[in-house]
Amino acid sequence: MSRPSVAEKRATFRKLHESGCWMIPNPWDVGSARYLQGLGFKALATTSSGFAWSEAHADNDVPVNADFENGYADDPHGVAVNVKLAAATGVAGLSIEDSTGNKDKPLYDIAFAVERMKAARAAIDKAAPDVMLTGRAEGFISGVPDLEHMIARLKAYAAAGADVLYAPGIRTREQIEAVVKAVAPKPVNFLNGAAFGHSVSDLAAMGVRRISVGGALARSAWGGFIRMAKEIAEQGTFAGFKDAASGAELNAFFTKDKAARQS
């Protein structure tokens, strides 16, 4: 069975953003990526935190493709160079955020952040025009939870060429609907990284186009691991294993998956 080309996958990814509301879950390693694909999800997103934890790093210690942090450069030229390299890997989309990593000044000035977004857009247009660019406004997770200010940034990033807008950290219906309305008709990604009480249908009704979960799946896996490790170490019991995934189920899935990849 022939596999879709990079161009075909990018076209499919772009098409997904035209209507409806869909999930783009975040695997943290090859096995979790293959399993999520096997469940029928139409696209996957990386998680810098999930991958970092799997490599015994804290989040932001190692660069991860696609969840492209701040472009791994401050100046627009550096962003352009790195975006070009990322596009060459075959990704269907990547994001550029406006956080600096500096707690004393957590966000780039908006004019400078716009120049960085424009540089990313120009690099994509030159290297791989079918790659989608997501503009991220990080205020709510960087200690600057000002909705009006964040919306102004999102609108500026949309004007600078971002295809999708993303404001991690918002969580209420009022916040979500305000963001969707502000950047329409461009699609919005919502980060549902905790039990906020929203369903996929709820978010669809709010106008959200794409739903990601960030590091939440990885944290869920770590939660099960930590609970069992502590139970064994502290209580000397194994009761929690009753919730473990079936080895037979995992073996069956990966055997079938491997055969499909080799066919």
Image: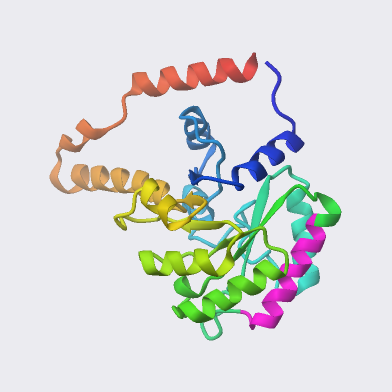
The x and y percentages for residue 109 are 64, 83
Q: Which residue is drawn at 68% across and 62% down?
A: 162
Image quadrant holding the N terminus, namely top right
Residue positioned 56% across, 19% down in the render? 258
Above or below 43: residue 96: below
Q: Quadrant of the rendered structure where residue 151 is?
A: bottom right
Q: Where the C terminus falls, by quadrant? A: top right
Q: Where is residue 30 in the image (x, y as percent from the top left)?
A: 54, 36
Chief SS of the magenta region: helix
- Asked if residue 98 can be seen in this view, the reply is no
Front one among 246 and 185: 185
Placement of 53 over or under 111, stated as above or below: above
Of 112 and 256, the residue lying toward us: 112
Q: Position of residue 48 (x, y in %)?
A: 54, 55
Q: Residue at 13%, 45% (x, y): give it.
A: 235
Q: Is residue 95 visible?
A: yes
Residue 179 at x, y = what percent?
A: 50, 67
- Residue span colored magenta: 108-124
> For this view, does 79 lie left or right of residue 218?
right
Q: Residue furthest bottom?
A: 104
Q: Nearer the viewer, residue 139 or 250?
A: 139
Residue 222 shown in magenta: no
Instruction: Say whether residue 120 is magenta.
Output: yes
